[in-house]
Image (spheres, grey):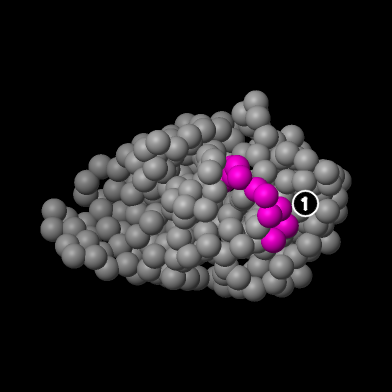
C-alpha cells in the first residue's frame, strides 16, 4: 500500500485511490521523480526494450502486437513501438498512466489493475517488467495475474516477465539510497528495508531540492518473495511453458512463458 506523508514545504499530490487495501499504486509525487531516478540508477528503458524485443522475436518471430502490463510511465512502450505494429499499455496508477500517454499520445494506455483486467482482445506478446511480479501478495494472486495474461495471449503467444528476487537468492539489504542531479533540481531516495519471511517492506523517503525550496514525501511499499520453482509452477498451472533466461536486462534475467498453439 502506498502512503504519502505531509511535505516539509510545498504540498504534494494526494495518493490516487487504491483498488483495495494493500495494493501498491504510485502517487503523483512518485510519478514526478520516477523516470529521473530510474535513469540515475542505470535503468536504460529504451535499450531494455531492444532486449525485450529480441526475446519476443526469439520465441514468437511473427509477433505484431504487444501489451505492456503495469507499464508505468511508458518508456518501454516508446522502444517497443519502434519494433512492433501494435503496442498498448495497462497501468493502475493514474499519474503514471498520464505520463505514459504524454510520451506516446497516439498509443492506447488502458487504465486497469494487472490482477484483474479484461480488454476484450488478445496479443502476440505480453510483457510485465520492472519486478512488478513481486507486488503480488500471495501465490494465489500471482496465479490470478498469470490467468489474466493467458486470457489475453493469442495461440503461440509469449509472456516476458522480469522477476524480482527469487526466495533462494534474495539479498538482505537493510538500507539503500539513490541520487539524481539535474539543472536546478536534485532528488534523493533513501530506503529502509525490512524482511519478515517472504514479505519485504520498503519505506522510501524522497527529498526534492529546487530553487523554490525543499520538499519531501514518504511512501511504503510491500513486496513478496517466491522461489524459482514456485514461479515455474504458477506459470505451468496457467498453461504456459516456462524458462528462465539469466542475465539481462538487470542481472536477474527474464521469465519467459509461451502458450502452445
Compared to 103, does 200 lie above or below?
below
Look at 48% across and 65% down and name the residue there. 47
Q: Residue at x 47, y 70 (%)?
A: 176
- The outermost residue toward the left is 211
Please identify the quadrant where the N terminus is shown: top right
Is residue 191 in sight in this rendering?
A: no
Q: Quadrant of residue 183?
A: bottom left
Asked whether residue 62 is drawn in magenta, I would say: yes
Which residue has dot 1 on it?
258
Q: In the displayed structure, would residue 48 be above or below residue 224?
A: below
Q: Out of 84 and 218, give the one closest to the viewer.
A: 84
- Give the camera-side residue of 161 and 225: 161
Q: Quadrant of the C terminus?
A: top right
Q: How many numbered circles does the render carry?
A: 1
Q: Work out whether residue 237 or residue 15 is closer to the camera in this orientation and state it.
A: 237
Q: Is residue 32 left or right of residue 70?
A: left
Image coordinates for residue 195, horizontal then vertical, percent: 64, 63
- Identify the residue at horizontal 25%, vertical 53% (top origin): 215
Q: Per the image, is 111 magenta?
A: no
Between 185 and 203, the residue placed more toward the observer is 185
The reply to whether residue 193 is visible in this rendering is yes
| Span shown in magenta | 58-69
Mark 1 neighbour class, 10 Å CA radius: few under 14, some 14 to 19, many 20 or more: many
Tell me where residue 150 appears, x and y as whole percent.
Answer: 75, 40
**Kind of element beneath mark 1:** strand
Residue at 67% across, 49% down:
62
Q: Of all residues shown, which one is farthest toward the top? A: 120
Quarter of the image holding residue 134? bottom right
Left or right of residue 260: residue 74: left
Left or right: residue 137 compared with residue 25 = right
Amino acid at each position: 500500500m502506498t502512503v504519502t506523508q505531509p511535505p516539509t514545504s510545498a504540498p504534494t499530490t494526494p495518493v490516487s485511490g487504491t483498488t483495495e487495501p494493500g495494493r501498491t499504486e504510485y502517487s503523483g509525487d512518485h510519478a514526478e521523480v520516477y523516470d529521473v531516478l530510474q535513469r540515475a540508477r542505470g535503468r536504460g528503458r529504451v535499450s531494455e526494450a531492444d532486449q525485450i524485443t529480441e526475446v519476443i522475436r526469439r520465441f514468437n518471430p511473427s509477433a505484431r502486437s504487444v501489451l505492456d502490463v503495469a507499464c508505468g510511465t511508458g518508456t518501454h512502450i516508446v522502444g517497443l513501438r519502434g519494433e512492433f505494429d501494435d503496442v498498448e499499455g495497462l497501468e493502475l496508477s493514474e499519474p503514471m498512466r498520464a505520463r505514459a500517454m504524454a510520451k506516446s499520445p497516439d498509443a492506447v494506455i488502458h487504465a486497469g489493475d494487472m490482477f484483474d483486467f479484461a480488454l476484450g482482445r488478445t496479443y502476440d506478446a505480453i510483457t510485465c517488467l520492472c519486478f512488478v511480479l513481486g507486488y503480488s501478495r500471495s501465490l494465489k494472486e500471482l496465479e490470478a495475474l498469470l490467468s489474466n495474461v493467458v486470457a489475453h495471449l493469442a495461440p503461440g503467444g509469449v509472456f516476458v516477465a522480469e522477476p524480482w528476487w527469487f526466495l533462494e537468492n534474495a539479498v538482505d539489504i537493510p538500507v539503500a539510497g539513490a541520487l539524481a542531479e539535474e539543472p536546478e533540481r536534485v532528488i534523493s531516495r533513501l530506503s529502509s528495508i525490512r524482511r519478515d519471511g517472504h514479505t519485504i517492506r520498503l519505506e522510501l523517503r524522497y527529498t526534492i531540492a529546487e530553487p523554490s525550496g525543499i520538499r519531501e514525501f514518504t511512501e511504503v511499499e510491500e513486496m513478496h518473495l517466491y522461489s524459482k520453482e514456485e514461479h515455474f509452477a504458477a506459470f505451468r498451472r496457467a498453461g504456459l511453458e516456462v524458462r528462465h533466461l539469466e542475465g539481462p536486462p538487470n542481472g536477474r534475467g527474464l521469465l519467459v512463458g509461451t502458450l502452445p498453439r
